[in-house]
Amino acid sequence: MSMSVLGLVRASHPEPAAAVTVVAALLARGVGHDPAGITVVALTVLASQLAVGWSNDLIDADRDATVGRTDKPVTTGAISRRALARATVPAAVATPLLALATGPAAALCATLGLVSALLYNWPLKSTAVSVLPYAVSFGALPAFVVLALPGAPPPPVWLVAAAALLGAGAHFANVLPDLADDARTGVRGLPHRLGPAGSRVAAAGLLLAATVALVLGPPGPPSWAGLSAVAAAVGVPAVGWYAGRTAAGAGVRQVAAFRAVLVVALIDVVLLVASGRVV
């Protein structure tokens, strides 16, 4: 039982799942949710992240086995495909049910984000529009958080746009370590068509654009903290690219670029919430 639970945790893509859930909770606090509202938002986002992560490993099981992905528990036998399927369905169903506690408009946004992410897992991952589900799902996140407030106020356009840009950048950074393996198994998303250099440029540019939108979007002049976030959006990815190259030279899977995106996202949201300029 303990091995199965550990396998499920590892198959959930725990780092991004935890980071996105924390970002959602921080944003919920920043827009004015009470503790109960923050809890519902966090649980909804966590359920969605679990469903997406588990379905991703389930759908990619044969492909991961072909390229020898020993970091995937379904490939090593730590968790069965049947167990992943059994876990995915209730997590997916729980997402809109939990979101309904905050209202129909918020539930619609949460469901949109989940469906878009599932469509990335299949069939859009191998198409030229592979970036679209990331943009839609990330953009739906702050829309859900804001619409979940009493009265369902409309989410700021700049906030949704910034999240969509961040999601698009995350797509390019996330795929970078897998370009060679994906080529062996026939995956041809937009990052694969642009290649490693083009994907790095796209990830860095989109991440910077997202941060600038978060800094300039709210009313009033940008704060020094916001300008610091822009500097972080330049510096942190650069460190991530360098760390990735070092890892590649050592024969280790390059995940530093995607972790850099998560770090910048957390920095952006913390500074945004601290400034009190979310809605």
Image (tube, rainbow, N blue to C red):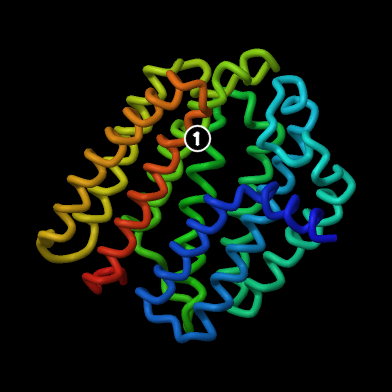
Query: In the picture, which quadrant includes the N terminus?
Result: bottom right
Q: Quadrant of residue 123?
A: top right
Nearer-the-camera pick, 123 or 72? 72
- Identify whether 43 is placed above or below 37: above
- Left or right of residue 164: residue 39: right
**Residue 100 % position (x, y):** 65, 75
Q: Determine the secondary structure under disc 1.
A: helix
Q: In x, y percent, where is residue 206?
A: 34, 37
Q: Quadrant of residue 130?
A: top right
Please state the horizontal and vertical placement of residue 257, each as a whole percent of the image: 40, 35
At a point 48% along the width and 29% down the height, the residue shown is: 254
Image x and y of residue 272, in percent = 27, 64
- In the displayed structure image, the side of residue 101 where residue 142 appears, left or right: left
In depth, the one of 256 and 264 nearer the eye is: 256
Tell me the residue at 41%/69% (across/down): 26
Residue of label 1: 174
Is residue 172 or residue 146 the one in the foreground? Answer: 172
Residue at image location 70% in from the left, 47% down from the top: 11
Amino acid type assigned to the residue bearing label 1 in the image: Asn
267 or 222, which is in the foreground?
267
**135 to the left or right of 11:** left
> Which residue reaches farthest right?
82
